[in-house]
Image (tube, helix red, strand yellow):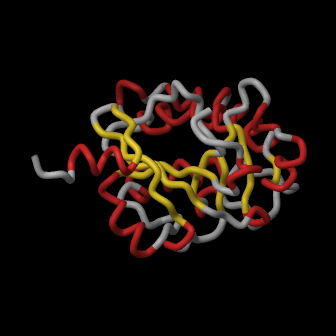
Amino acid sequence: MIFKDYQETGRIYHIISIHDLENILLHGIQFDGKLSYHTRYYEFHGMIDALKPEWVPSWVVRSKAIFGSLNYPDDHKFHSHTAILAIKIHPEKCWIANENYANQIYEPFVLQNLKEYAPCVQYLQTEGRELLLKYWNTSHSFTENLIHRYDQEERYDAEVLILHDIAPEDIELKYIISDHRMMNINAWKARFCCCR
């Protein structure tokens, strides 16, 4: 894993576009504060929220969550032009779910309105719906996960739903991903901020 365990650091990790970095360092993170939120994710999250079972607390609303990860494997492939932030959270205001289930429906959800891909609506209504029910039925509170560590089970790709704003003082810039190179901040500054 790239980082030490949450039990040691008290931090989780959040990936952002470098286009959002200045605003986030100045103002913190809000669930709808990124450039891509309304254009790429709001309706997708709403579809998942619509299947949330009654036993999941009412404060857990995916469409109002900031998403984070407890860690990443050493061979994780990050997108270029992104930054990895270490953030301090309020564990009692966070939820854990298996991102593998939600990820399997994202492309069909996005492409369903294109004529050539319209038949994927059937997938969303059947297998996709079952995947989203599994998403919720294998989810847990963040504090419960710290006891049972579901996130360490094989094939459980834990995403953290953070249901509170993140203040600027609770954010640390750890890495910038530049042309598929992962550079910590000192290495990035040494490469791009020094005159030659």
> Looking at this rendering, what residue extends furthest in the front direction?
196
Drawn side of residue 137 relative to residue 161, left or right: right
Residue at the image position 51 percent from the left and 29 percent from the top? 76
- Count of all numbered marks drawn on residues in the image: 0
Instruction: Please name the residue shown 83% across and 40% down the image.
Output: 149
Identify which residue, 149 or 162, lies in the foreground. Answer: 149
Image location (x, y in percent) of residue 151: 75, 37
Q: Is residue 118 left or right of residue 101?
A: left
Q: Nearer the viewer, residue 168 or 123?
A: 168
Tell me if 175 is positioned left or right of 7 in this view. left
- Residue in the foreground of this view, choosing between 174 and 37: 174
Say which quarter of the image contains residue 103.
top right
Residue 195 appears left or right of 190: left
Identity of the residue drawn at 58% across and 53% down:
67
Could you say where residue 122 lies in the image, as x and y percent from the top left? 58, 28
* Quarter of the N terminus within the rendering: top right
Percent position of residue 145, x then y: 83, 47
| Residue 47 or residue 89, whichever sits in front | 89
User: x and y percent of residue 17 in the render?
Assistant: 36, 51
- Tell me: residue 192, above or below residue 59: above
Q: Residue at x 21, y 53 (%)?
A: 193
Most extreme residue toward the left, as rendered? 196
